[in-house]
Image (cartoon, rainbow, N blue to C red):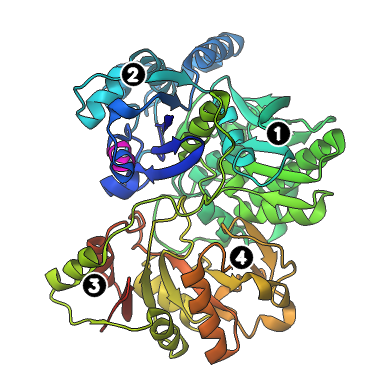
Amino acid sequence: MYVLGINQHHDSAAALVRDGRIVAFVEEERISRVKHDGTFPGKAIQQCLAMEGITLGDVDHVAYFWQARKEVQHALGHFVRHLPATLAVFRNDAGTYDGRASGLTATLRSGGVQQHSDDYNVGGALLLHLKRSLTMKKVVCDAVGYTGPVKFQVHLVDHHISHAASAYLLSPFERAAILTWDGIGSDGTSTYLAVGEGDRIRDVRRVKFPHSLGALYACVTSYLGFHPTRDEGKVMGLAAYGEPTHVEAMKELVHLLPDGRYELDLSWFRHHATGKHQMAPKFLERFGPPRPRTRDAVPQHYADIAYGLQATLEEAGLHVARWLQQHTGETNLVTAGGVALNSVMNGRIFLETPFEEFFAQPAAADDGSALGAAVQVAVTQGAPRPTGGYIFLGPSYSEAEMEKALADAGLAYERTDDIKDTTARALADGKIVGWFQDRMECGPRALGNRSILADPRGKDTKDRLNEKVKHREPFRPFAPSCLVERAGEYFASGYPSPVMLLVFDVLEHQRERVPAITHADGTARVQTVSAADNPRYHRMISRFEELTGVPMVVNTSFNDNEEPIVCTPAEAVSCYLRTDMDALALGPFWTQK
């Protein structure tokens, strides 16, 4: 039985499950080369089918990550309940009521997405999901150019159930508390609390929009001059440079209530609007004008606001998680949704609540809802819960394809007897190395198959990577890939963190030893590497430890600023040539400048 999972709107993706086993997962951006591509994932679907050697005619079920009927019910109720304020959804940039209503049809024509915009039309997005739910068979067939007969049944899966399934059903736990959180889901849910038992997910509580931690964080991300739904990670990194000047004021935005609930103080926001329209006069009077969208240095005032926002999120997250644990009595926690990418909050939840075990799969945001929808439908159709790997599910390439990419670029290269040793020696000598191996990883983080690597001991490594290779803001940190068996010697916790979604303090006596992975606040977003998960990467880091005494390397995603992580050998070679990387390990092949 084949189940194809699909999500669309931002970070579109497709997943393919065969008899309960996940055989492919591909984000549309990796194929289209448009970062955070939100168009219908036709290219990703084609890639998934090709990896398995099947056609659309072989698919038994299609799982879509959204239930449009629930969204319509919630949206209409919300619109009426908050009149006349909700009329602002139709305003244009000038603040008048002409222009935005026409955006409904424009949004439909564009597929519900405006690339590089933080002001998408909410009504248009709603209509898009409704249209998709009514025409899914035709949309899927058209997207891949398939004209043959199909047998698949379409299933519309609740958005937060998709998130919950992606976390719980992929976890190793037979029981767990489930916590998913993002901006908004099918029925307006922004935070979903549940319990997983066997292969079933049982609701505990839902918090609904406009009360949304994800929407709050996105709104302030836009205010700080970044792109909402894509740059929240930058704000998390920026917060480490802030001071607690605005913490108390920022906490006024979120009221923590009994029973694990919370509410936003809506007087600070125009929650019915989007993007730059969201900030109410009260917010601007208290915190000042928004920061322009610019690559200039971030003034301290805005770093302080980022600090206050992050502190507010962490306090609210701890409040919800503590209640969930107390209410359910569970000691295992699984999490997903865009807010679950906030690894600083995750680390505090793990360390400061009674939960003893933690699990998240790497595509925790909306891209992973395609995976969750597919797995949820597979299980309800009688397939077993997935077993096997959940990290490296993307395309892989042959040695012939790798060698051709090098030859086509006119590069001198050699095939090494041991690419792991060659790479470790280069890193120990201070070189920055592109590392391209095996199947592509899931989600937004490089996890050791499409990575740029460096020596964590170098005091200038962070600046070299930001300025010369990644061409990005200087406040952004770099993560360590650390041998799982040695992590406790360097970090406040040695708990396994294979998908880089937990931040821990770097032990104070180790910070001078590994400055390149130590953030301004003394923390690191840790990836632990085991021989079971990635034997080649584990062996390379082990060899680096033999040479240097340090059981970790700097790991950042293999891409230049504002482009998706490289997928193909040709893209890896192109990125290598366009940046100041010193060397490239492309499968068994080695080239250096």
Which residue is nearer to you in this view: 528 or 227? 528
Magenta stretch holds residue 28: no
Is 106 located above or below residue 36 in the figure? Answer: above
| Distance from the alpha carbon under mark 2 to that under mark 4 | 44 Å
First to last magenta residue range: 43-48
Q: Which mark is residue 577?
A: 3
Q: Which mark is residue 151?
A: 2
Question: In screen coordinates, is 483 left or right of 397?
Answer: right
Circle 4 crowding by C-alpha within 10 Å: few under 14, some 14–19, many from 20: many
Amino acid marked by disc 2: Lys
Identify the residue under disc 4.
Answer: 526
Residue 579 in percent (x, y) is at: 29, 72
Residue 533 in percent (x, y) is at: 54, 62
- Please, what secondary structure does the residue beneath circle 3 have? helix
Q: Residue at x 72, y 68 (%)?
A: 494
| Distance from the alpha carbon under mark 3 to that under mark 4 | 29 Å
